[in-house]
Image (spheres, rainbow, N blue to C red):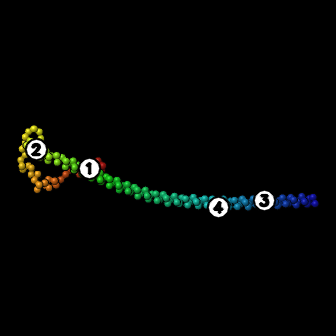
Amino acid sequence: MGSSSGTSSGSSLIQNSGSEENLQALRKRKRMISNRESARRSRMRKQKHLDELTVQVAELEKQNHHVLTSINISTQHYLNVEAENSVLRAQAGELSNRLQSLNEIVNANNTGTAFGDSAITVPAADLSFLNPLNLPYYLNQPIMASADHMFNEYY
């Protein structure tokens, strides 16, 4: 009995170790399947995130294009207004000079002297611009300033 109990306990150990090996192999296989599934889910999450980022990049590029277009339009509008302002400043300066000249002529006519100490009489025919009927003619004289001449360095 001694030998048979030794053998039976040996075969029981072999069976136990065999079933433990099977159990370990089963656990290992299960873990491997679980790891593969986890890796697959991780790849899917990464792909989904990448797709979301791609959509976001496209949307940001679209917004960027709209902003750049708006900036370009605003810059062009600014340059146009700046050119117009420069022309208007030049015209205002020219009109101011005209007004000053007219005031000097009127003062010279009223005082009987002109620029300096010498007395100059201005004939009435030269003052025809003071006639209210002739005033629109003198006011409609062209002013020579234009944007073409002022901004040559920009173009």
Helix, strand or loop at label 2? It is helix
Horizontal relation, residue 106 to residue 1: left or right: left
**Residue 61 occupies which quadrant of the picture?**
bottom left
Helix, strand or loop at label 3? It is helix
Helix, strand or loop at label 1? It is helix
> Whole-Å distance between the Cαs marked 1 and 4?
72 Å
Nearest-to-viewer mark from 1 and 4 = 1
> Whole-Å distance between the Cαs marked 1 and 2?
33 Å
Amino acid on which the number 2 mark rests in the picture:
Ala
Q: Residues within 10 Å of mark 3 (few under 14, many from 20)?
A: few
Q: Quadrant of the N terminus?
A: bottom right
> Whole-Å distance between the Cαs marked 4 and 2?
104 Å
Horizontal relation, residue 103 to residue 18: left or right: left
> Whole-Å distance between the Cαs marked 1 and 3?
95 Å
Q: Which residue is mark 4?
A: 37
N-term mark: 2 or 3 = 3
N-term mark: 4 or 3 = 3
Dots 2 and 3: beta carbons under 8 Å?
Answer: no
Helix, strand or loop at label 4? It is helix
The circle on residue 108 is 2
